[in-house]
Image: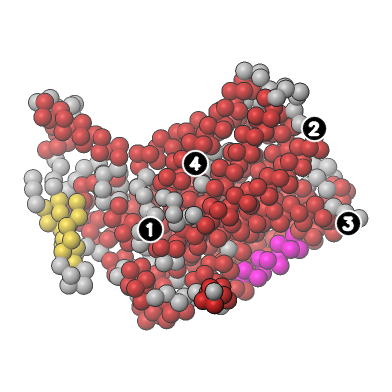
Amino acid sequence: MTSVFKKIASPPGYVVASTLISIGGFLNGYDTGSIGSVTEMKFFQDTFGELTPIMRGFTVSLIMLTGAFPSFFAGQLANRYGHLSIIMAGALVFTLGAALQGGAYHLPMFLSGRALSGFGEGLWISNCYVYVTEISPSARRGVLVSISQLATTTGLCGGYFTCYGSTKIVSSISWRLPYIIQAAFAFTLAVSTWFLPTSPRWLMLSGKRVAALKEIDRLNLSRVEAEKDFLNSTNEIHAAPSTLEGFLIIFRRQYRARTMLALFILGMVQLSGIDGVLFYAPTLFAQAGLPSQSASFLASGVSAILIFAVSIPAFLVADRVGRRTSILVGGSGLAFCMIVIGSLYASKSVHPTGAVRWVVVVLIFAFALTYAFTWAVSAKIYASEIQPARTRAAANCVAQGVNFFTNWLVAFTTPIFLANSSFGAYFLFGFLTLGTVLVLTAYMPETRGRSLEDIQAAFHHRPLARSWMYHLRKFFSRSGVSPAGSEGAQSNRNSLELNVMRGGNGSTPIDVGGLLAVDGGTGTGIEMAADTAAAEGITEVRAVGG
């Protein structure tokens, strides 16, 4: 028992760092939980006037739109200046934006504050996930990255209950208070970065091995963990690229597939329609036939509490359930909920006094809880950990930019869809999610429990879809039948073997054919293998067949 209390009282440095950085997730959830209620407060409307539906949608979603732009280059800046420096800069910008919102006396000033907050959030949010990914031992990475998601749901509840309590204040402080709290937390995040250990992987990437060893000690990592997750990563050491080069390099042949997979995952998680549910749940419940007061309570109160409650077990089992399993099973559940709701509306089965309306209510809750337990946790972990060290920050930040944009798109267009069709939005989100599951079934290797370096080896194997094509060609070849174009393609395919020299431990053969196929190569050859070898630190390329 004493040892348990000691662990709680003196957690490892990487746990403390991950927890402090999760303030960024709290801020993200806090704004989501508060902005809808703020725009409906009496004193907010007295200050700015009653907003039209279009202006309200623009005001709510503006933070996502302005967050998308800096996300595209935040990773390149982090490669050059370090994750903590960019997180600090973003947190300070967010602090200024929150202060402008809290002190606004006309709508343009309030919108300027939201735009600034979005810009700051775009700088730090993806770098927070990358930072935690890089300082975490592989066995605990899922749980530690999930702290930010748990903080996001905590912020969601905090935003709601702050507004619930502040509505009783008979002055403009009722709507200003949430932004005062946001500014305080954002400034705390900025100050925290001064005291946190720098990512050892970033230091190794910058050629600062001695400094990396010191930071490993500050993180309280064991030598075994350090050897596995940091010190044997010499094949990934490169000089930090320039901002433009850092953006372009993620689309080179050897990195392209992993970049596109991250863009696809973080874009499609939003196109599942989750923000349509979070922002417009009162509208969805009212559409199902519930009284507006009941709808508001269910949407704002119960949903926030339940999402938070579900996030706790999701956090605890993050490293016990495979990322692939979580995303595929969760996506299937999300698609099922949306398609069934759309079918009920399309068949005109939903009535204000009928029992079917409760089926819709339950499915909306089931959708939100399934998302919180699966995609909300696994998607960002996966998008970050599949990237090589040289491109991790840049690729993940560009993917976060896509996430911001699709987030804004859903938040802005959902009211328009609902106004024109009772079932169209559900079918759209449901079939988009189903398509995502089918694509990831074919192209998503498992990463749970692997070191970041071992994960890269998974991309040296053929994806499932290409394996089917390979076995199909093999079947036709044995039958004496050549599918159209396969003979020419096969004649140009060299069997390549890469000898990887690492620390005098001999050579490890790696099949390059599968890697080049995954990474979008149109063929194989010595030139393409050499490009891959140079990027991965491989010292020798040898053709072993023709």
Residues tagged 2 and 4 counted as in contact (Cβ below 8 A): no
* Residue 262: image location, x then y, percent: 43, 49
Cα distance between the residues tagged 3 and 4: 41 Å
- Residue 449 is tagged as 1
Q: Is residue 284 left or right of residue 424?
A: right
Question: Is disc 3 in contact with disc 4, using a CB cutoff of under 8 Å?
Answer: no
**Marks 1 and 2, the one that precedes in the sequence:** 2
Residue 479 sits in which quadrant?
A: top left
Q: CA distance from mark 1 to mark 2?
A: 48 Å
Residues under labels 2 and 3: Cα distance?
Answer: 26 Å
Q: Residue 71's spot in the image, x, y percent?
A: 53, 55
Is 180 a magenta residue? yes
Amino acid at circle 4: Gly
Dividing the picture into quadrants, the one containing residue 104 is bottom right
Inter-mark Cα distance, 2 to 4: 31 Å
Residue beneath disc 2: 291
Q: Quadrant of the N terminus?
A: bottom right
Reading the image, the residue beneath label 3 is 169
The label number, if any, that marks residue 330 in the structure image: 4
**Span colored in magenta:** 179-190
Give the mark nearer the N terminus: 4 vs 1: 4
Q: Residue at x 61, y 56 (%)?
A: 152
Front-lying residue, 307 or 512: 307
* Circles 4 and 1 in contact, beta carbons < 8 Å: no
Tell me if I can see residue 281 in this picture.
Answer: yes
**Dot 4 alpha-carbon crowd within 10 angstroms: few under 14, some 14 to 19, many 20 or more:** many
Under tag 1, what secondary structure?
Answer: loop
Amino acid type of disc 2? Pro
Considering the numbered disc 2 on the image, is that residue within a helix, a strand or a loop? loop
Residue 30 vs residue 221, the one in the foreground: 221
